[in-house]
Image (spheres, rainbow, N blue to C red):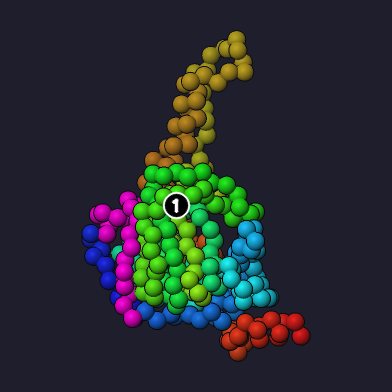
């Protein structure tokens, strides 16, 4: 359904995880696979992860779904974001499939956002790669380089922003345009009129996250593991100390598990085959309501 207008070999060699790239007309004659009303319908579901972000009088506000009212989207400066749209909306999932030249275990999810004029989530930094696809409307984007490291701060309990940065890309995306943003590159985007955007994200866990998930995996294994032993232990005057050899021995019994290829292959295969999102959403009877105002009226009755 969608054909990506991109030299993939050149992209992977010169841009992937290296620097941002603007792909004009990445999808020619682009047609949105989802409507604003369908986005609102999904944001009403408890099993779907959604947020509403707004900026008014210089104050940022972020709320988590599910939502029953969408009045804020009728005013400028608001956006509603729905995670893992690829699980709930098959036509939208086709967008993520276009990027299958990247290994599937790296894929996280496809997020969709609908914004009123000037709506966005503010300047921020992501720790993963993302492709931003412009749907209906336009959005003004500024992207910095990875080595800028602007200071981050909490703009709201659910929002982390970064300080001002110099842009290496400063452009307005039109339908079908794609923006690739590598990890740690600061960026901000604001709708020019009403706009829909799709974000194809690729996860990159840090050491803490991987070790935590590995520990959870080990706890589920019904088997004996190597236990620490010290048959050559000698009497010690300083009984509260841990000697360097003991530190090494304890480290070895932990790292030996990660050195076992059969263990790691099983863990990683299981781990990256699992979805980070719930998949048991029931489709509402009658489909999604086709008007924001009707959504609010029917719920309030």
Instruction: Confirm whether the magenta stretch covers residue 287.
Output: no
Which residue is depicted at the point 57% across and 52% down?
A: 160
Which residue is depicted at the point 58% across and 67% down?
A: 77
Which residue is depicted at the point 36% across and 53% down?
A: 168
Task: Point out residue 126 in the picture as x, y percentages from the top left corner.
Answer: 47, 53
Count of marks, rendered view: 1
Query: Measured along the vertical axis of the image, is residue 158 above or below residue 295?
Result: above
For the residue pair 213 and 49, the one nearer the viewer reads as: 49
Q: Is residue 105 visible?
A: no
Task: Point out residue 184 in the picture as x, y percentages from the top left corner.
Answer: 43, 49
Residue at the front extreme, as displayed: 57
Mark 1 Cα within 10 Å, few/some/many (few <14, many 20+)? many
Q: Quadrant of the C terminus?
A: bottom right
**Image quarter for residue 93?**
bottom left
Q: Check disc 1 and report its element: helix, strand or loop.
A: loop
Give the residues drawn in magenta, as a range.
11-29
Query: Measured along the vertical axis of the image, is residue 135 above or below residue 141?
Result: below
Residue at the bottom extreme, as displayed: 286
Instruction: Confirm whether the magenta stretch covers residue 19.
Output: yes
Q: Is residue 277 visible?
A: yes
Q: Is residue 258 left or right of residue 13?
A: right
Q: Which residue is mark 1?
A: 186
For the residue pair 55 and 93, the one nearer the viewer reads as: 55
Q: Is residue 12 left or right of residue 37?
A: left
Task: Point out residue 17 in the picture as x, y percentages from the top left corner.
Answer: 34, 52
For the residue pair 252 and 230, the one nearer the viewer reads as: 252
């Amino acid at each position: 359904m969608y054909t990506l207008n991109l030299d993939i070999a050149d992209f992977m060699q010169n841009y992937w995880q290296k620097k941002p790239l603007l792909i004009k007309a990445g999808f020619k004659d682009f047609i949105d696979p989802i409507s604003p009303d369908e986005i609102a319908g999904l944001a009403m579901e408890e099993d779907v992860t959604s947020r509403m972000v707004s900026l008014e009088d210089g104050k940022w506000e972020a709320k988590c779904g599910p939502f029953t009212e969408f009045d804020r989207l009728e005013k400028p400066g608001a956006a509603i974001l729905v995670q893992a749209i690829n699980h709930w909306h098959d036509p939208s999932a086709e967008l993520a499939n276009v990027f299958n030249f990247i290994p599937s275990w790296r894929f996280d999810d496809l997020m969709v956002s609908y914004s009123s004029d000037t709506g966005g989530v503010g300047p921020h930094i992501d720790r993963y790669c993302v492709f931003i696809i412009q749907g209906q409307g336009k959005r003004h984007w500024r992207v910095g380089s990875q080595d800028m490291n602007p200071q981050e701060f909490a703009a709201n309990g659910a929002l982390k922003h970064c300080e001002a940065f110099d842009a290496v890309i400063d452009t307005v995306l039109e339908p079908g345009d794609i923006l690739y943003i590598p990890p740690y590159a600061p960026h901000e985007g604001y709708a020019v009129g009403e706009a829909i955007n799709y974000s194809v994200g690729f996860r990159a866990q840090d050491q803490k996250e991987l070790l935590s998930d590995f520990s959870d995996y080990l706890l589920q294994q019904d088997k004996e593991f190597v236990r620490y032993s010290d048959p050559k232990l000698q009497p010690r005057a300083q009984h509260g100390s841990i000697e360097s050899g003991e530190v090494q021995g304890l480290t070895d019994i932990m790292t030996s598990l990660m050195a076992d290829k059969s263990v790691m292959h099983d863990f990683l295969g299981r781990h990256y085959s699992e979805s980070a999102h719930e998949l048991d959403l029931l489709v509402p009877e009658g489909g999604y309501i086709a008007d924001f105002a009707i959504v609010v009226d029917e719920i309030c009755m």
